[in-house]
Image (cartoon, rainbow, N blue to C red):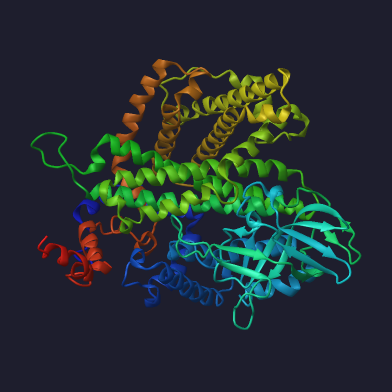
Amino acid sequence: MATGGVCEELRRERSGATFDIAELTHLLDGGRDKTERRKELEKLFHEDPEFQSDVPYCYLTYSEAYSDALQKCLKIYQKAMVLSDPREILTVADAILHDSTPVHVHFVMFVPALMGHANEEQQAKWLSDALMMKIVGSYAQTELGHGTFIRGLETKATYDPATEEFVLHTPNLSSIKWWPGSLGKTANHAIVLAQLHTKGKCYGIHPFMVQIRSMENHEPLPGITVGEIGPKMGMRAADNGFLKLDHVRIPRENMLMKNAQVTKEGDYIKPASDKLNYGTMVFVRVLLLDMFAFNIARACTIAIRYSAVRRQSEITPGQGENQIMDYQAQQYKLFPLLGLCHSLRAMFANLMELYKQANQDMEQGNLEMLPELHAISSGLKAFCSDMAAKGIETCRLACGGHGFLLISGLPRLYATTVAACTYEGENTVMYLQAARYMIKCLAQPQQLSRNSTFRFLLEPGTLRVPPFNARLKGREAIRQLVPFYRAAAYKQVHRADAKVKSLIKSGLTPEIAWNHSQVDLIIASKATVLYYLGLNYLTWVENGNISERLRDVLLDLCHLYLLHGIYEQPGLFLVVGLKDQDLTDISSIITELLKRLRPNAVPLVDAFDHHDMVLSSALGSYDGRVYERMYESALKAPLNKTQVHESYHNFLEPLMKSKL
């Protein structure tokens, strides 16, 4: 283990902080009490030898990684059961485990699906066992041939009134369930999404509870073919699986019937609203925002600490090698990402409150908020996963060759995050779903409430943006940027809408016109989410109950984030009033902000308060002993167990000593 205490570079960086690091930690956690509680929970793991690993995770085989994660998951579960609220431990557990786990889908998808789609009688039958892990579940939706296009799923559930059973069947190769987490080796039950057929008519996709493995020996039940799909780009410990159903019969009561039902006679009773399924989707996307914020914060912590320790080349000849964080290019790569971290944290808190309100309304039969919240969460899921994945890759590149090593922790963070660009709705489709709602708002303005997020799309005055003023200081300098973002969103949405209408007028069908406008619609969707994130971020900084010393730093970071967004995508803003000279002025302001933020870079990542165990990185540890940890890790590499590998004797030696 690296010894010698905190390195000199990081001690010096921390001594230069202009704000109270603990105060920012409390803000990010949601209050001092939540920080203290998080630390109490973390001690359950950090001080437990069963959660310490002598061999780095990246050296484990595929099977060992699965087994190690499952063992730790169950130990975490046992610790959770002694808490008054077991849910408290979930975010801490995710941090400790580093990767998606064999029971992740059970808690994030299977249990919420039971709560959202099972009626009271069904919840009494299954929910308690699921919470106690007497049954372990998967959520089997995606198929080999269909993913985001849910209506295209081919698995059938045909009702047989003679036996009061559903017959579930995957009729062809493309209908085999493919990708569900926990399905490969862990789950004994699955909520299977299938096309419901009764009395000769198809009623679309519905959820069914299916036991897939024996409760005695875990062997697959008759008619079930199930297994693991194989190695992936990341998430090694998650046993994503396949499921083939050969006329598997289940009781009628195994159709989850909180919303839609099928009677004993086979009559279909439709749900009160087709919007009821939005709730679960929105909830998962809210949780994803939290994951994106968490992952990009860890990546920034690793890259910025490393940048403070690593020295390379000279800025001024003869003055010695500089910390790479002293180079402006490095600052420009990393500092705006700190702003992204904060904007995602702020957006998560805001969206969670919107979701809670919508959920309360839904329980009372009021579904008005759901379509808009679904659209917002779709756009945010796509944009934030894109930005987080790109940001983590930027952090990896900022660490040079060492960032390419798995022990840096960055490749794992990237793989975990970039996967979310596809699951829970492929991002291109999510952008288009958000855009469809925006276009609908223009066509049916009466559906928008006075407080709607999209109300600005109906106000032509949005395009009247005051000229950019480089002389403004403080909050006014930042506030002047928001109208540019709002106008850019307005412009792109109306431009996309005009293109769709023009193509329809030219004779194309609405569907073909939409397809030919997808590039513009996605740009419109991204511009709108970019505005929404920036507006919410500034509100979070301005309204936070914090000291002015801290607010000054956060305002600088927010200012940099918003200017960076303009400087990187000037085309969006030049069409709504920004001038070429303004870009020159913005460049100068960015230069000044980078210099002002430089002394606080390490303190800003320290405020995320990520334990070394959570970072799991040789490059990003709190003590900054980068090279010691890298060397120690290399010594543990499996290939270094012997000086001469057996392959030398088998292959190299015969060739080298041959007489040919």
In this rendering, does residue 54 appear at all? yes
Q: To which quarter of the image does residue 374 belong?
A: top right
Instruction: State the quadrant of the N terminus.
Output: bottom left
Instruction: Judge by depth and name the residue closer to the eye, 521 or 250.
Output: 250
Q: Where is residue 544 drawn, in percent x and y?
A: 51, 45
The answer to which image quadrant residue 246 occupies is bottom right
Q: Is residue 17 above or below residue 160?
A: above
* View extreme (bottom): residue: 216
Along the line of sight, which residue is nearer the eye, 590 or 246? 246
Image location (x, y in percent) of residue 233: 44, 54
x then y, percent, for residue 338: 40, 44
Residue at 88% x, 58% y is 199
- Given residues 83 and 112, the one toward you in this image is 112
- Is 218 positioned to the left or the right of 113 in the image? left
Q: Residue at 81% x, 57% y: name it.
A: 197
Q: Is residue 526 above or below residue 205?
A: above
Residue visible at 76% across and 63% down? Answer: 256
Instruction: Point out the residue furthest to the right here.
Output: 265
The image quarter in which residue 369 lies: top right
Q: Quadrant of the C terminus?
A: bottom left
Residue drawn at 66 percent across, 46 percent down: 149
